[in-house]
Image: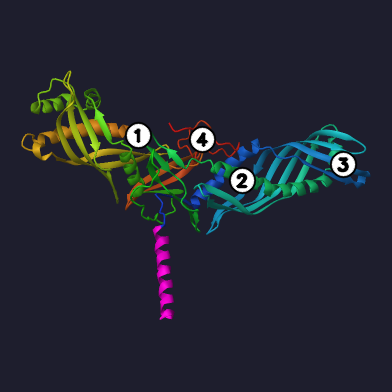
């Protein structure tokens, strides 16, 4: 009996662990996929970045000591300082995905022209001047491994670094340049040795400096006075033979409450495409969490005065007068009125192929306040407004706009005998069309920030509504001009040159 019980207990324990691990699975609200086309473009953009970087980089001095037997000089101490890379070429450079590992970088047949100051000391003489150093046969290979730290920031690690310069030629300038150039060749070998020993530590240092910037990314960003948006990584990037996937949390929180919404994200898969450099999938969960967060924070409770309504109705050829006259037909009004519209539940988000809708369950209360009197309710109505959501990428933001499809109006039961529902439907339709939606769309013009690296803009972008998520397909463009203002405080603030964080507060 005991023998039979043990396997049963272990079986139950296994199933329990399986259910626990399954329940703790976290799915992303946003997926970002970089394809091989992005890596190929990254080579081009990377060369521009490196060119800017090396022109400002302080390269450590190179020094040493050599004996010059042909001149019967026991030693010559040399020091190369103020080393500047003036030009370089890496004609054979590539980036490739290493499945399950990271991204392999390879360059060979590189060349570089370097200027430097020099100083030499020996028992017989001492001098200083300038020199040019030409390097050829530059070779580098290494694998960049991408992971996630405990706070959800991306981190990089350089693995299997190997860098070598095959040839170096030194050319001195100055009054005694002919003499110095005659014994420059013996100095080239130790220069190469010192340089080759320095290359991988220098490159590793750059990766570590980049990690310092990555750790300062604002993965939890304040969007406005109502919400925060969490862009943190939920796991380490996934690397396959053809792409790299980033899984971002992609959830909104009310400003004062960082508890997850009472619903969970569901898994979704990006389609197997490679025509664009970058694909971004924004799930229904992302928008549902935004709806819940804004509702919880009280953002969907708006009271409009007569003046505010007039400012939006003025665009309508019928004008505010028609709406007021309709109300006056029911209630003789000689004083201004107010309209209060508030969502009674979080707006319902639905993403279906080719169709993005937002259903808003709400109530509308028309109020008036006679002189020297308290506020009086004229009528209170419940309705559900069904809207279509239009989408466009502007700059580095996803811009949404609402258009009213239909609404269903219901009046409190006691009012049915006194209120003509149809006439109030017309009034409500006008208020929604020309009063509320323009206000909402003006707010939505601020858009949702899309994660993008510094100086990288989206071009040739396309948006599709698929089952349960939006798919943004886009190419990338690296902008060298410093005039462009970054739009997303977090990813765009990286400064690869000065190793400083330059994030700006949200507008």
Q: Are marks 1 and 2 in contact (CB under 8 Å)?
A: no
Instruction: Work out how far the residue at label 1 is from the one at label 3, CA to CA, in angstroms.
Output: 69 Å
Q: Nearer the viewer, residue 21 or 86?
A: 21
Residue hosting label 2: 208
Residue hosting label 4: 503
Disc 3 residue crowd, few under 14, some 14–19, many 20+, Cα 10 Å: some
- Indicate which disc residue 76 carries: 3
Local secondary structure at mark 3: strand
Image coordinates for residue 319, horizontal then vertical, percent: 18, 25
Instruction: Work out how far the residue at label 4 is from the one at label 2, CA to CA, in angstroms.
Output: 19 Å
Local secondary structure at mark 1: loop
Q: Nearer the viewer, mark 1 or mark 2?
A: 2
Q: Are marks 3 and 4 in contact (CB under 8 Å)?
A: no
Residue hosting label 1: 445
Farthest front residue? 2
Q: Quadrant of the C terminus?
A: top left
Image coordinates for residue 198, horizontal then vertical, percent: 71, 47
Left or right: where does residue 91 sit relative to residue 65?
Answer: left
Image coordinates for residue 497, horizontal then vertical, percent: 60, 38
Q: Are marks 3 and 2 in contact (CB under 8 Å)?
A: no
Disc 2 residue crowd, few under 14, some 14–19, many 20+, Cα 10 Å: some
Instruction: Work out how far the residue at label 1 is from the one at label 4, CA to CA, in angstroms.
Output: 22 Å
Q: Nearer the viewer, residue 157 or 115?
A: 157
């Amino acid at each position: 009996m005991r023998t039979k019980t043990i396997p049963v207990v272990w079986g139950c324990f296994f199933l329990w662990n399986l259910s626990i691990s399954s329940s703790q699975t976290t799915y992303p609200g946003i997926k970002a996929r970089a394809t091989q086309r992005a890596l190929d473009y990254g080579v081009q953009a990377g060369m521009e970045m490196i060119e800017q970087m090396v022109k400002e980089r302080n390269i450590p001095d190179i020094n040493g000591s050599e004996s010059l037997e042909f001149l019967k000089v026991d030693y010559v101490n040399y020091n190369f300082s103020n080393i500047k890379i003036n030009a370089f070429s890496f004609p054979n450079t590539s980036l490739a995905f290493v499945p399950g590992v990271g991204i392999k970088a390879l360059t060979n047949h590189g060349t570089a022209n370097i200027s430097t100051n020099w100083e030499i000391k020996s028992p017989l003489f001492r001098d200083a001047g300038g020199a040019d150093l030409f390097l050829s046969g530059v070779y580098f290979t290494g694998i960049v491994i991408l992971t996630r730290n405990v706070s959800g920031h991306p981190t990089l690690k350089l693995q299997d670094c190997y860098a070598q310069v095959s040839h170096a030629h030194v050319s001195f300038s100055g009054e005694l340049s002919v003499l110095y150039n005659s014994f420059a060749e013996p100095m080239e070998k130790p220069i190469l040795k010192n340089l080759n020993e320095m290359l991988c530590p220098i490159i590793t240092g750059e990766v570590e400096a980049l990690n310092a910037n990555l750790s300062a990314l604002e993965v939890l960003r304040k969007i406005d006075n109502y919400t925060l948006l969490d862009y943190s990584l939920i796991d380490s990037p996934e690397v396959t033979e053809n792409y790299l996937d980033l899984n971002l949390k992609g959830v909104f929180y009310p400003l004062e409450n960082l508890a997850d919404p009472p619903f969970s994200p569901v898994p979704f898969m990006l389609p197997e495409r490679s025509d664009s450099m970058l694909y971004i999938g924004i799930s229904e969960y992302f928008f549902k969490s935004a709806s819940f967060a804004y509702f919880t924070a009280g953002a969907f409770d708006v009271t409009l005065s007569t003046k505010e309504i007039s400012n939006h109705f003025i665009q309508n050829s019928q004008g505010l007068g028609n709406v007021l006259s309709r109300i006056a037909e029911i209630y003789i009004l000689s004083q201004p009125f107010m309209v209060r519209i508030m969502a009674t539940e979080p707006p319902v988000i639905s993403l279906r192929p080719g169709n993005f809708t937002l259903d808003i369950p709400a109530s509308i209360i028309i109020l008036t306040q006679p002189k020297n009197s308290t506020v009086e309710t004229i009528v209170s109505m419940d309705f559900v407004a069904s809207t279509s959501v239009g989408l466009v990428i502007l700059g580095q933001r996803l811009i949404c706009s609402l258009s009213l499809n239909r609404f269903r109006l219901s009046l409190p039961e006691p009012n049915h005998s006194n209120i003509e529902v149809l006439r109030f439907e017309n009034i409500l339709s006008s208020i929604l069309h020309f009063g509320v939606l323009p206000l909402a769309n003006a707010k939505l013009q601020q858009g949702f920030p899309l994660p993008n690296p510094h100086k990288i803009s989206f071009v040739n972008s396309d948006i599709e509504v698929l089952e349960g998520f939006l798919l943004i397909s886009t190419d990338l463009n690296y902008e060298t001009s410093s005039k462009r203002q970054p739009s997303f405080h977090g990813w765009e603030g990286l400064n690869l040159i000065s190793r400083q964080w330059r994030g700006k507060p949200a507008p």
